[in-house]
Image: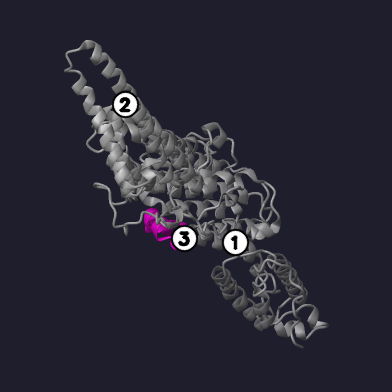
Amino acid sequence: MIFDGDRQEVDLYLQAVDEIQKSMSSTSISSDHHDQDSNDNRVNSAIQIAMARLEDEFRNILINHTSPVEVDSLNISDRASSYSSSSWNLFTSSARSSAEFDQEEFGGGDHDDGLDPIQRADSTNSSSSYRSTSSIREIDLIPQEAVADLQSIAKRMISAGCLRECIQVYGSVRKSAMDASFRRLGIEKLSIGDIQRLEWETLETKIRRWIRAAKVCVRVLFASEKKLCEEIFYGIGTSIDDACFMETVRGPAIQLFNFAEAISISRRSPEKMFKILDLHDALMGMLPDIDVVFESKSSDSIRVQAAEILSRLAEAVRGILSEFESAVLREPSRVAVPGGTIHPLTRYVMNYISLISDYKQTLIELIMSKPSTGSRYSGDPTTPDMEFAELEGKTPLALHLIWIIVILQFNLEGKSKHYKDASLAHLFMMNNVHYIVQKVKGSPELREMIGDDYLRKLTGKFRQAATSYQRATWVSVLYCLRDEGLHVSGSFSSGVSKSALRERFKTFNAMFEEVHRTQATWLIPDSQLREELRISISEKLIPAYRSFLGRFRSHIESGKHPENYIKYSVEDLESAVLDFFEGYPVSQHLRRRSQ
């Protein structure tokens, strides 16, 4: 090829083409029509041969200097949620082992820390910029020497009326390069239907990769392709560069955005929320760049498609939040969790809304209306009450989060009724509301939105549940340690009924042993809460037992077989209380008091 050889030969050839084009105008002033026709034919033939040759040279230069972009060297950053859909299968799973109930339902997440061609997000360190958008990073797709050759050929081809051929050659070669870059970025040629048929777990990985790849495509590949078109066709015509640009990128751009469009119109479900938010945030961040790269009238359709996808993603988020609230309210599991521990639904919901709070800035803009709630006047027993007057000044998003906690508690109260033991039902509510409080306290964003007033209200609820547990369990036990019913003949000094006293000790022993045996298998997962409740029990039980023992020990020890009645010392009871709420059976009987 001529342009592969000596530069002097290239210059001579281009001069010859210029001479042929000049000769076309000179033949028009010939007076001899016969000679003019003959000259025109010769010149036209020469021009056609020259243009065919230049077209081949144009294609050859493009091919020789076109290669897929080395995406490994790019530094385009990305935000990924610490979320894995395998953690969000509660609403579709009904059977769980007891061991699962003691584990955190929310997985550690998938940060996708493996090596990837595109590593970090929204880099502002690049020295290159494109017009007003600093995140765009242009690169040279073709060396400048080759660009100069392509420009000189394009000018002559278009001058000779070969615009269409020039655009077709350019588009066909550059589209192939774009396809190769897409493959390196992991962008597959999938239809919207193909994408919607994929399992969500598979789509999660593809969304993560798409976000990174899309940033490279918009901010590097498409922007650089636009720059290349402007350089090659500079000064030739105002719309020729744009025509070549759209010839090259229209198909790839549609392919790229079809993926996001398929996600935006897919079936909604709670586990999709955070990946859709990632997609929304990424597209929102790219929108100014899309507007710059696709600024011409001929690329209106690309800009419109991106804006419409963004709108549909926002609507999908609002719909998912509403469906999530309904799912929490209606979650149907009827199997009581062993030991009154934290219900998987509680872990699921609180981890979910903690993640929601991580997307606070986006969601405050997207969530614009209050939740649809019940009220104390509705009379609907299937929906809890919530009065907005008590929560003035809060954003719609904050109201939705509070509403989710309200309906979670409402659902948990229904589940507590499946326990036959009232004490265990109260312990269950204490555990779960305490977990809610701790999760709110552990997330600064969530705590800020929920507010300290509502947090104090929640704290009061779990403390009330703890008080209710103590009443349900220990009032009857402590009732055995009263003086009433032990005295006869109205004499308080010596008229103690030994038979009634023996019966009272036996009853106390049996009741305490049953409580000890049962409640050792109950579970309070939070160590601080477990210790606080044990201390509270001890503060009521131990002084009452010590006082009762001090008043009546002599009456029992003066009779036969006192060890059958005074079975435990104060220290034995103190030690036994430490067995409570560990979640497994006591391996041995209560230690007998020292004789």
Q: Residue furthest top?
A: 33
Residue 29 pos. (x, y %):
16, 18
**Residue drawn at (43%, 42%), measured in percent from left and top?**
63
Q: Is residue 227 visible?
A: no
Could you tell me how far apart the alpha carbons at marks 2 and 1 are, in whole angstroms?
99 Å
In the displayed structure, would residue 381 be above or below residue 509?
A: above
Point out which mark residue 47 bears.
2
Quarter holding residue 526? bottom right
Could you tell me how far apart the alpha carbons at marks 1 and 3 are, in whole angstroms?
16 Å
Q: Which residues are magenta?
A: 438-460
Q: How many marks?
A: 3
Residue 227 pos. (x, y %):
30, 43
Q: Is residue 170 visible?
A: yes
As helix, strand or loop, the secondary structure at mark 2 comes to helix
**Comparing labels 1 and 3, the label whose residue is closer to the camera:** 3
Sequence-wise, the earlier of marks 1 and 3 is 3
Q: Based on the picture, tell me whether residue 158 belongs to the magenta stretch.
A: no
Disc 1: which residue: 469
Identify the amino acid type marked 3.
Thr
Sequence-wise, the earlier of marks 2 and 1 is 2
Residue 400 pos. (x, y %):
42, 45
Q: Please state which of residues 16 and 441 is positioned toward the viewer in this rendering.
A: 16
Q: Please state which of residues 462 and 436 is positioned toward the viewer in this rendering.
A: 436
As helix, strand or loop, the secondary structure at mark 1 comes to helix
Q: How busy is the neighbourhood of tag 3: few (under 14 within 10 Å), some, or many (20 plus)?
A: some
Point out which mark residue 459 bears.
3
Residue 6 pos. (x, y %):
34, 47
Q: Please state which of residues 10 and 71 is positioned toward the viewer in this rendering.
A: 10
Identify the amino acid type marked 2.
Ile
As helix, strand or loop, the secondary structure at mark 3 comes to helix
In the shown orientation, is residue 253 left or right of residue 485?
A: left
Q: Looking at the rendering, in which quadrant would you find the C terminus? A: bottom right
